[in-house]
Image (cartoon, grey):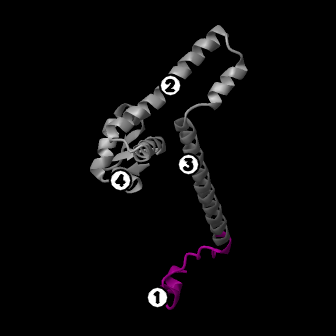
Amino acid sequence: MLTIQDLADLLGTTVRGVRLRIELLDDLVSPHLHRGSRNEILVDQAGVALLQRLEELRKTRQLPLRDAAKVMREELIPISNVNARKTEETLTSSLPTEALENEEASNSWALKLLIEELRKSNEELRKERDKWQELALRLQNRVEELERLALPSPKDQKPWWARGIFRWLWG
């Protein structure tokens, strides 16, 4: 998850510019916004992908931000219409499964980009999990070695003054 400042650095804009982009795509980005420990706004990978696509549209087509947001909404709306149509068609069974698979294969760039981001983050999490698991196993082995090498606990000995002359008193 990235903070607003991280997004500003990533997108090459200011914090205010990132906030404006989030405001323009509020209904699309809001599910991907979270609050951090210091009440800071955090954006997950899917939200980052949406904001990067907005910036890409703005730069490649040389559009103002508001127009780029409109174009992006138009790109994403057919996805929801296609999904609604798919559910209707599967209920009526008018299309063969091959046609549905072809429609699914032709989904927009956003879904493919989001899936790729999820795969990357999943792989990173797996690597991190394996690293910590390996560290825990090494520490456990080290503790077992130290337990074997540990000296037995000392016998209950009397202080030095009780071992000499006064030994016959305590016998």
The quarter of the picture where the C terminus appears is: bottom right
Is 85 located above or below residue 169 in the figure? Answer: above
Residue neighbourhood size for the residue with mark 3, other residues' Cα within 10 Å, grouped as few (<14), some (14–19), many (≥20): few
Residue neighbourhood size for the residue with mark 4, other residues' Cα within 10 Å, grouped as few (<14), some (14–19), many (≥20): some
Residue 8 is tagged as 4
Tags 4 and 2 touching, CB below 8 Å: no
The answer for how far apart the CA atoms under marks 1 and 2 are is 93 Å
| Amino acid type, label 1 | Trp
Residue 160 picture location, percent across and down:
49, 87
| Amino acid type, label 3 | Ser
Q: Which residue is mark 1?
A: 161
| Amino acid type, label 4 | Ala
Q: Which residue is mark 3?
A: 121
User: Quick one: SS at disc 1?
Assistant: helix
Picture quadrant of residue 51? top left
Tell me if I can see residue 40 in this picture.
Answer: no
Residue neighbourhood size for the residue with mark 2, other residues' Cα within 10 Å, grouped as few (<14), some (14–19), many (≥20): few
The answer for how far apart the CA atoms under marks 4 and 1 are is 74 Å
Residue 74 picture location, percent across and down:
44, 29
Q: Is residue 57 left or right of residue 101?
A: left
Residue neighbourhood size for the residue with mark 1, other residues' Cα within 10 Å, grouped as few (<14), some (14–19), many (≥20): few
The magenta stretch is 147-171
Say whether disc 3 or disc 4 marks the residue closer to the N-terminus.
4
Q: Nearer the viewer, mark 3 or mark 4?
A: 4
